[in-house]
Image (tube, rainbow, N blue to C red):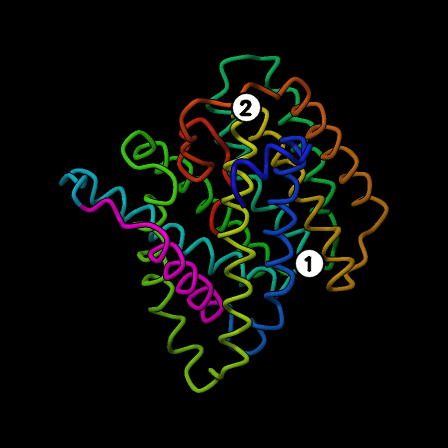
Amino acid sequence: MSKRVLKSVPVPPWGLAVAAMLSVQLSSALSVDLIAAVGPAGTAWLRLSVGALIFLAIARPPLRALRRHDVPVLLGLGVATGLMTIAFLASIERIPLGTAVAIEFLGPLAVAAVRSHSARALIWPALALLGVVLLTEPWDGDINLAGIGFAGLAAIGWAAYILLTQRIGNRFTGIGALSLTVPIAAATAAVVGIPQSAGHLNLGILAAAFGLAVLMPVLPFALEMFALRRMTPTAFGTLMALEPAIGVLLGLLVLHQQPSLTQFGGITLVVLAGAAAQRGGRRQPRSREHAGPRTDPDLIGQGMK
């Protein structure tokens, strides 16, 4: 998709961001069948490995730019990405997709709250948080503690991902950064993923992994990068509050997970928060290519779920 084509199509930046989130959650929903075949760690390993190969094919890792102090941060970011991916996939094996996304979203919400320097800016994340609570329904007696625990670990991983990305955001940008960190994430997932998937691999499984890797992270990265050229990082980051709602929607459409009336109320609050955040979020395109959502230090990115 070229710049010329994108300029000729009147797609608003928030539309590109929502399309990216749809791609992420569709990948998650479609991963459920693969999880049943090769396990959550095996699915994480396959998706991340294919993603790593794609990024390595289209971008050369900036190895010459590496400094000794960069190595621990890059390793930490890759390991956090791999563990976050395994934890999230393990959670959707046990609890509904929308609930898992809602719990995981508490990680970036906490980071956003700590970073905010304006009391007014806290209104929309707070509203989104209330929506997340309604989507999660913690008062429900039928609770899968393991699923919630894995989603909580994914939330911690997402928060760590954002903080570590902030450390290297000014050093490595865009696909070059992903060509460094995604292979590390794949290697991390391989420790458990290879034994878990051993004996279950075939051409159908590998083809499914390739398609899922395109849906996440390749396509969302491209869409987010173009969206960020015309949106403020703050507007884009808070717009990510739509992700739990999209998770519930795709859980209903793809996995037939019926949300309750309370969860529909949570969806409404989250959508309102996201819509309010994106108002006034358009900006003029930059003259240089933006680093992208995975490496912007002021942005709640989607991670590598």
Does the magenta segment cover residue 138? no
Q: Which mark is residue 194?
A: none
**What's the magenta region?**
41-63
Does the magenta segment cover residue 57? yes
Helix, strand or loop at label 1? It is: loop
- Give 285 or 15, whichever is nearer the viewer: 285
Which one is in front in this view, the residue at disc 1 or the one at disc 2?
A: 2
Q: Residue at x 65, y 20 (%)?
A: 123
Q: Residue at x 50, y 82 (%)?
A: 203
**x and y, in percent, of residue 169 in the image:** 34, 32
Residue 123, above or below 267: above
Q: Residue at x 43, y 40 (%)?
A: 294
Mark closest to the chain's N terminus, 1 or 2: 1
Residue sitting farthest toward the left: 68
- Give 275 or 159, whichever is nearer the viewer: 275
Which residue is denoted by mark 1 in the rendering? Answer: 96
Locate residue 144: give its quadrant: bottom right
Locate residue 295: give its quadrant: top left
Residue 182, above or below 302: below
**x and y, in percent, of residue 53 in the image:** 37, 62
In the image, is 287 to the left or to the right of 10? left
Marks 1 and 2, how far apart at CA: 29 Å
Helix, strand or loop at label 2? It is: helix
Which residue is denoted by mark 2 in the rendering? Answer: 234
Amino acid at the residue labelled 2: Thr
In the image, is 236 to the left or to the right of 273? left
> Do the numbered discs 1 and 2 sit on residues whose CB atoms are within 8 Å?
no
Q: Main secondary structure of the magenta part?
A: helix
- Give 18 or 114, whichever is nearer the viewer: 18
